[in-house]
Image (cartoon, rainbow, N blue to C red):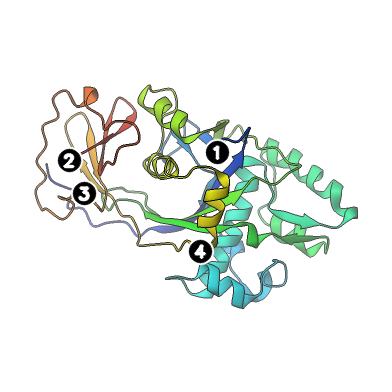
Amino acid sequence: MTESTVTPAVPVRASTVILIRDNSDQLQVYLLKRSSRSGFMPGNYVFPGGTVDPGDIGLDFWKRYVDMDPGEVKRRFCGGLDIEDAMAHGIAAIRETFEEACLLLAGHTGKAGNDLEKLQEPRSNGTLPGEWLRELVLSGDWRLTLSALAPWSHWITPKARSRRYDTRFFMACMPEGQECRPDNSETTHGVWINPEKGLAGNLKGEIPLSPPALTTLHELLGYTGIGDLKEEMKTRPWGEASIPRLVRMAEAAFLLLPWDPHYRDQEIKADVKGLEKRPAPLGKPFSRLWYSQGIWRPLTP
């Protein structure tokens, strides 16, 4: 098996938010199902997120409307980013989380309560103005809760893909008083689920996970609960970018993750016969994903 030799597309900057909550002493994450008409990961369950828009850019503007000063932003989010990019990724994360999951990471004064309700209707019917977040903070009643976000991981779409994203994955705890729901356009279904059930649902074909979502849920199996995870969030850096290698086959595809022992091999050899019956056991380490019949399945080399 060999990779495509086509010149790779330049990745577009994007942000994603892994929302977590405690439900009856059980860690849960929020997943959204992408529309089957989507041009990227159609039908897959993902975390809320999207591209960094031009309106998300502008440190001099946004620093007045977030709950962290530039020094704090630099210490917490830069790690390989300059402060302009770090702020833009954070603003995009907040904006996209509302647009896709109807959750606004922001604090407001008492008189601003109806502003969120006014935004929910255009958000639901697809008429939300492009500059809605700027307009919201310019009202003077809102401050974006950038401090609610914590760096988690950094993924870049494989070079073989025609549409590529350079994505910063943030993690945030679900705040009280709000409810997540899909937009019924880009996303068609939302579910809170614990990592183990999410991974099991993927193998059954009930909750087809995107590769980053699958890998993240597997990582979360290593935490005893939300308290343990919150401690990790305090100091976790972005880490090295994960750039999987996509290797196409006649009726399927392999995704090699950076820690696979053959990741840097020019030629990849694999016997695909019966792989659907030999996935990596739930919770056990894996280093590659096999795509077949709409499902990414974790495998050991």
Residue, disc 1: 27
Image-based side of 14 in relation to 145, left or right = left
What is the CA distance from the residue labelled 3 to the residue labelled 4? 26 Å
Amino acid carrying label 1: it is Leu
Closer to viewer: mark 1 or mark 3:
1
Q: Of marks 2 and 1, which one's residue comes earlier in the chain?
A: 1
Choose top left, top right, bottom left or bottom right for residue 192: top right
Closer to viewer: mark 2 or mark 1:
1
Name the image quarter holding the C terminus: top left
Q: Is residue 158 above or below residue 221?
A: below
Residue, disc 2: 301
Amino acid carrying label 2: it is Pro
Residue, disc 4: 235
The residue sitting at 72% across, 55% down in the picture is 106
Choose top left, top right, bottom left or bottom right for residue 66: bottom right
Q: Residue 260, which numbered label? A: 3
The residue sitting at 11% across, 41% down in the picture is 1
Q: Is residue 217 above or below residue 230?
A: above
**Residue in front for this viewpoint, 30 or 16:** 30
Mark 2 lies on a secondary structure that is loop
Q: Of marks 1 and 3, which one's residue comes earlier in the chain?
A: 1
Closer to viewer: mark 3 or mark 4:
4
What is the CA distance from the residue labelled 3 to the residue labelled 2? 7 Å
Furthest toward the right, the residue is 111
